[in-house]
Image: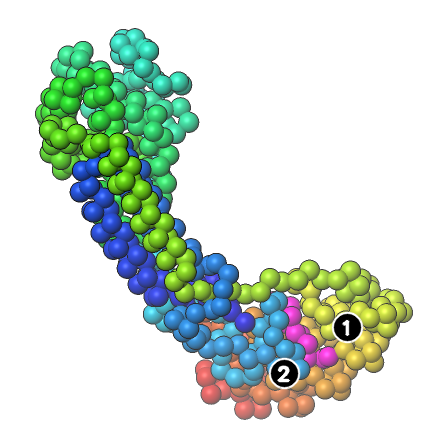
Amino acid sequence: METLSESLIRAVPTLIGLHLLQAAVLLAMAIAFARLRALDAELRSWLLLALFALAALAPLASLLPGAPSPVFGAPAHSLSPHPEEGPAPDEAIYNAGQRADMLYLEIPRSLPGALALAWALGALWQLMRLVEGARHARRLRRGARPAPALEALLARELPPRTRIATTAVDGPMVVGLLRPTVLLPRPLSERLDADALRDILRHEFAHIRRGDLWSAAAVQLARAAFWWNPFLGALQSRLDLAREMACDARAAASGSGVYFAGSLIDSAEVLLELGERPEPLAVAMLQRRSHLAQRIDGLLAAFPAGAPGRRRLAAGGCAAALAAFAGLCIAGAPRLSLPAPTAEPRADVVALLAAARRGDSAEARRLVRAGADIDARVIGDGTALIEAVRARNLATVDALLALGADPDRAALGEGNPLIVAAELGAQPIVARLVLAGADVNRVVTYDETPLINAAREGHLETVQYLVAHGADVNLGVVADGWLGRWRSPLNQAADPRVRAYLIEHGAVAGRP
């Protein structure tokens, strides 16, 4: 049974293709929304934010409940539990053979795995850049000088818990999610007149009142996660423009769009003289100077946003298109094959493992006869028989075998009874398990074979016993995931006596 991470890795190519298609459609919708003259700048910015949010969240529809889709294809190789054990969410057993024993490290061996690795590394790099941007914004804030004169200039319009400060060259921008600070370059504050400064500060106040710092941070996180999607980048660019135009409209509402456009041009001229600066994690008024012409055109546009009826009709049509596409994404998204949740062990099973652990054979018999599943597995502990072996209690091992315990029953991460006994070098228990029918060549995920474990620990007597009872001296597994290291009894043995014995009985270096 696949884990969630394995299902996700296998689905990566399909998810990438689907997300590219969805983002392309949403980008086309954004372009169409931007051309609707009936929409004002404020409403257009929120619609584009909704489009971006839908583009970022659409892939999550594949995690919703539903029948697994064949579009994701079958796993490259499926686990093969032994018939008598049956599949279970807490266990994965390989048939003896040449299969890798650590699935979660098999990333670069397939196209889905390579894409998943590249995706993760790229996202990590983008997140590191965001963290550096946040640190840069914090440094700017700490190094800025308070500007009480500017705060007094717009005292009635200053949002709560907001400060104004000046910097050497960076800005104008807003930094700080919880305690926003408007940063204004000192050359700008010295060269612009009071009216132009009011316009610039009102624009930044509009960002704060709209909550743009929070939405911009969320957008940048989504872009970091989907850094490979150019359509999402184009959608973000249009969202940034719409956000700035909405703040321009708010700032110009108390005066004239023509006057605000003049203030915007004056600010741009001063900032161009200051040169390009590193981008902090902030909302900046002129973060994208390529948008300046479009913003000025929007301020100087002669036509009104549209009559209320047309505006409501356009907004309703856009909302309906958004809802329809969201429904299509949910209904049409291929579903992943999700692992079933692991059930909590029953109280009697927990008690049975505890009895086996402390060697209380009488209590173990009572619990089994009362209905406790003698072969039940508990994650992190294994089975009752594994616990008895781990405690080196031969009497309890005998009691559990007499009650019908399966000597080959394995638990993921805990091995099986014979593997545990071989690793411990508990020879009497090894002999008892083999006599009860334990498979000396059983390969268990993450725990290899009994012979490999005995050889690794240098238990010569156990190695001799296992080989005498049919253990294959050349049966190994590919371990360490993509590193592809071959583990066999011989290359795991450090004891010279064990190595000599294995070679004497036909063990060879490397894969046979």
Q: Which residue is mark 1?
A: 374
Would you say residue 175 is visible in this rendering?
no
Query: Is 415 a magenta residue?
Result: yes
Mark 1 closeness class: few <14, some 14–19, many ≥20 residues within 10 Å: many
- Residue 104: percent from left, percent from top: 48, 66
Q: Are marks 1 and 2 in contact (CB under 8 Å)?
A: no
Q: Nearer the viewer, residue 152 or 408?
A: 152
Query: Is 443 a magenta residue?
Result: no
Does 195 sit above or below residue 95? Answer: above
Left or right of residue 283, residue 370 in this image: right
The local secondary structure at tag 2 comes to: loop
- Residue 171: percent from left, percent from top: 23, 26
Q: Nearer the viewer, residue 90 or 141?
A: 90
Amino acid type at circle 1 is: Ile
- Residue 450: percent from left, percent from top: 63, 79
The circle drawn on residue 83 is 2
Residues drawn in magenta: 406-416
Left or right of residue 451, residue 228 in this image: left
Inter-mark Cα distance, 1 to 2: 17 Å
Does 415 sit above or below residue 303? Answer: below
